[in-house]
Image (spheres, helix red, strand yellow):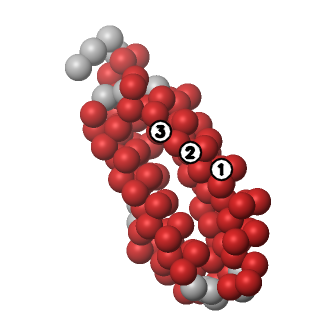
């Protein structure tokens, strides 16, 4: 579980970095940035999410899906206008908030219970 979530979060952070490039790009460059920077990481993120959905407890799945929805909303926003550094940071915070931290806390709780031999 921890490895899958680690891969998902790494893909998420990479995706957000790619979306930043898209968000800051001028309109005429957005299509190219999207193809080169964003789409390759979308596959990685989706694969990591599916692995979590198949293997992990519902609270982990639910939080990972919330992160996925936030990344999707950010992708729509990044492609729709040209942001400044500050406006992109605010948009990212609006959508992501503390979701990655929340997911890590949930996984740590599960890992601790598993290590203690508690299966549910």
Identify residue for label 3: 49
> On the rendered structure, is 5 left or right of 113?
right
- Look at 62% across and 66% down and name the residue there: 19
Circle 1 — which element?
helix
- Look at 68% across and 80% down and name the residue there: 24
Q: CA distance from mark 2 to mark 1?
A: 6 Å
Kindly tell me whether residue 112 is visible in this rendering: no
Q: Which mark is residue 45?
A: 2
Within 10 angstroms of label 1, few (less than 14), some, or many (20 or more) residues? Answer: some
- The quadrant in which residue 111 appears is top left
- C-beta proximity under 8 Å, tags 2 and 1: yes
Closest to the observer: 100 or 105? 100
Kindly tell me whether residue 80 is visible in this rendering: yes
Within 10 angstroms of label 3, few (less than 14), some, or many (20 or more) residues? Answer: many
Within 10 angstroms of label 2, few (less than 14), some, or many (20 or more) residues? Answer: many
Above-or-below relation of 6 to 1: below
Residue 45 in the image, given as x and y percentages of width and height: 56, 45
Q: CA distance from mark 1 to mark 3?
A: 12 Å
Circle 3 — which element?
helix
Residue 85 in the image, given as x and y percentages of width and height: 65, 84
- Look at 47% across and 39% down and name the residue there: 49
Identify residue for label 1: 41
Circle 2 — which element?
helix
Closest to the observer: 103 or 95? 95
Mark before the other along the chain sequence, 1 or 3: 1
- Look at 40% across and 45% down and name the residue there: 64
- C-beta proximity under 8 Å, tags 2 and 3: yes
Above-or-below relation of 30 to 67: below
Q: Quadrant of the C terminus?
A: top left
Tag count? 3
């Amino acid at each position: 579980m921890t490895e899958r979530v680690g891969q998902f979060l790494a893909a998420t952070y990479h995706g957000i970095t790619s979306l930043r490039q898209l968000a800051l790009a001028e309109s005429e460059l957005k299509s190219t940035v999207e193809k080169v920077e964003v789409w390759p990481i979308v596959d990685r993120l989706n694969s990591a999410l599916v692995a979590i959905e198949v293997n992990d407890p519902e609270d982990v799945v639910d939080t990972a899906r919330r992160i996925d929805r936030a990344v999707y909303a950010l992708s729509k926003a990044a492609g729709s206008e040209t942001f400044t550094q500050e406006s992109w940071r605010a948009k990212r915070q609006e959508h992501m908030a503390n979701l990655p931290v929340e997911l890590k806390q949930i996984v740590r709780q599960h890992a601790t219970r598993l290590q203690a031999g508690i299966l549910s």
